[in-house]
Amino acid sequence: MNEALAHSEDSTRADQRADARRSDQLDAIAVEEVSRVGDVAEGLRRATEKQGEERYASDPEAKLLRTIECLQGREWEPVTINRMVSRTGCKRDAVMRRLTRLKKSGWVKEIPSTKERLFVAGPKLENLARSLASAMLGR
């Protein structure tokens, strides 16, 4: 009878270990599935976030920023309208309108020239550049 009881206890322990292994396997599968679902959810969240950001993107603002970037040139030398047209890929009258607005607001200044109209960074852009450089050096 003791042998039967011992055999029964061994059988019960073996069954418990097998159940524990199956449970661990199921847990691993569940974690993998949740991970995949999490990856999909993260991908959807990123796609939705990107769509939200793109919804606020503005082509006119991007073109205005490209116009400002053109002022950098190689060494912040004065830039002609023709060079800005070629750098931005925009029409001459559109570049002129943007330069006029930037000039009125202090982001660009015009350098008097006998040949062509030349433009350089204005006081607001210079102050922003100084402030940014100072902040970056302070880190």
Image: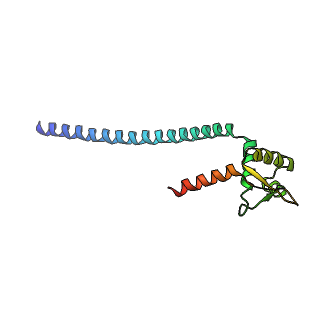
Tell me which residue sits at (79%, 46%) in the image: 98
How many numbered markers are drawn?
Answer: 0
Q: x%, y% of residue 83?
A: 81, 58
Say which quarter of the image contains residue 112. bottom right
Seen from the viewer's position, the closer of residues 59 and 40 is 59
Tell me which residue sits at (61%, 54%) in the image: 130
Q: Is residue 4 left or right of residue 15?
A: left
Tell me which residue sits at (64%, 51%) in the image: 127
Tell me which residue sits at (69%, 51%) in the image: 123
Q: Is residue 43 left or right of residue 55?
A: left
Outermost left residue: 2
Can residue 66 be seen at all in this image of the molecule? no
Q: x%, y% of residue 13?
A: 23, 40
Seen from the viewer's position, the closer of residues 24 and 57 is 57
Q: Is residue 31 left or right of residue 90?
A: left
Q: Quadrant of the N terminus?
A: top left
Can residue 89 be seen at all in this image of the molecule? yes
Outermost right residue: 115
Q: Is residue 76 above or below residue 23?
A: below
Seen from the viewer's position, the closer of residues 6 and 20 is 20
